[in-house]
Image (cartoon, rainbow, N blue to C red):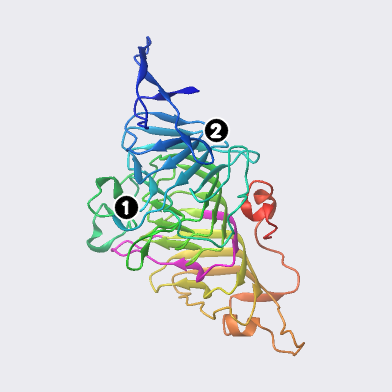
Amino acid sequence: MKKLFAIAMLITGGLMMVSCGEDDTTTIEVPVNELEGGLGVLVENNITANTTWSADSVYVLTGRIAVEAGSTLTIEAGTIIKGQAGTGANATALIIARGATINAQGTSSAPIIMTSVADEIEPGQIDSPNLSDDVDGLWGGLIVLGNATISVSGDAESTNIEGIPATDANGLYGGTANNDNSGVITYVSVRHGGSNIGEGNEINGITFGGVGSGTTVNHIEVVANQDDGVEFFGGAVNVNHVLVWNNGDDAIDTDQGYVGTINNGLIINPGDKAFELDGGEGTEEPAHTITNFSVMLGGAGGSIDTDSDTNVDITGVYFYGMNEDTGSSYDFDATTSTFTSIEVADTWDDDGSARSVTAGQFADAAFETLVSNPTVGANTSEFNSWTMASLRSAF
């Protein structure tokens, strides 16, 4: 069996039948590799020309793969991408470099899934047939970089993203164009990632570095990532409908003067904070917005953590699912940030005593209201059917 791929797609196998049409587009017919577990394509080199990944194959990342500036990677709805194991400089990740574009438009019936080669999922499936929802660190993650503004030490215009060796020029992000467009990411689920590249330096499930507001991002899921679920390093990208489940560190992390809006999110059992919200590291301290979230804290290290220079508006958030293991951190500075319409489930001890469990986690936090029935939070129907969390009844 053979398939057509763009010339930039380098995979194992010989070249056959080169042809040029009137549009000067060159295609090469190559044999598709038969990988363990089914039909697959090894991706071994950076993408330097417009390339399409189709839903009838599984694409296996053998290392750190970058879509380089000037190139577009189109990923069809229902496509499965798997990362091989790797740590340190060999950590596996898919990077959309500055000036490159990703066109990943999944659907509710055919989401795009990025996972590990240890996952036996095949085309046409959404849930993993073999991996638990708490297995993490099996590969890296998705990193999207752009030319929007960032606030870093020394007011540098650009810098290197965490999780990628500083020697890789494709890891640069930041610029002056807040309307920069890195493409489209919709109905994408990233699972079992967060491999370690150094002491205390893991790859997030999805990283946005200096990504502009011209980028479309909605309906994203991160499951079982060893580090943060989704992290924003500056930039102005707006994100709608985000679900983070069983991440090892913070669920939503903002840094370096992020100025976008994150709307309608569901966080389930974060490893550390639900929201780790830092301000700018340079002279600029712009504001961002988080709205309409439901957060099942479980054994989380805390709920909200901001710095003294964080400028964030958080509204319409419902916290629930606390227990005796839930951390009490809600470090915030109300002089630079605002917290409105924050509701907390009035959870009682198992023995029926009058002390609410929430007293330990939200003591003296004047911004919250204890409720039995929430009036704020996420519209969780946006996550039905296409997320791993939905299929496993996590909410």
Q: Along the line of sight, which residue is nearer the eye, 10 or 269?
A: 10
Picture quadrant of residue 165: bottom left
SS of the residue at dot 1? helix
Who comes first in sequence, dot 1 or dot 2? 2
Task: Give the answer, above or below, for where 37 lies relative to 166.
Answer: above
Image quarter where the C terminus lies is bottom right
Q: Is residue 216 visible to the viewer in this orientation of the structure?
A: yes
Residue visible at 49% across and 66% down in the picture: 248
Q: Amino acid at mark 1?
A: Asn
Crowding near the residue tagged with mark 1, few <14, some 14–19, many ≥20 C-alpha atoms within 10 Å: some
| Residue 246 placement: quadrant | bottom right
Residue drawn at x 72%, y 82% is: 348
Does 287 appear in magenta?
no
Q: Amino acid at mark 2?
A: Ala
- Residue 278, position as x, y percentages in the image: 40, 67
Residue that carries the numbered disc 2 in the rendered image:
55
Percent across and percent down for residue 120 are 56, 47
On the image, which quarter does residue 202 sit in?
Answer: bottom left
Residue at (45% x, 48% y) in the render: 237
Q: Is 276 left, or right, of 28 in this rendering?
A: right
* The furthest residue to the top: 22
Q: Which residues are magenta?
A: 262-286
Where is 324 relative to 19, above or below?
A: below
Answer above or below: position of 194 versus 111. Answer: below
Q: Which residue is mark 1?
A: 90
Of circles 1 and 2, which is in front? Answer: 1
> What x and y, as percent, mark residue 382?
66, 49
Task: Give the SS element for disc 2.
Answer: loop
Q: Which mark is residue 289?
A: none
Q: Nearer the viewer, residue 36 or 170?
A: 36
Q: Foreground: 364 or 44?
A: 44
What is the x, y in percent for residue 275? 50, 67
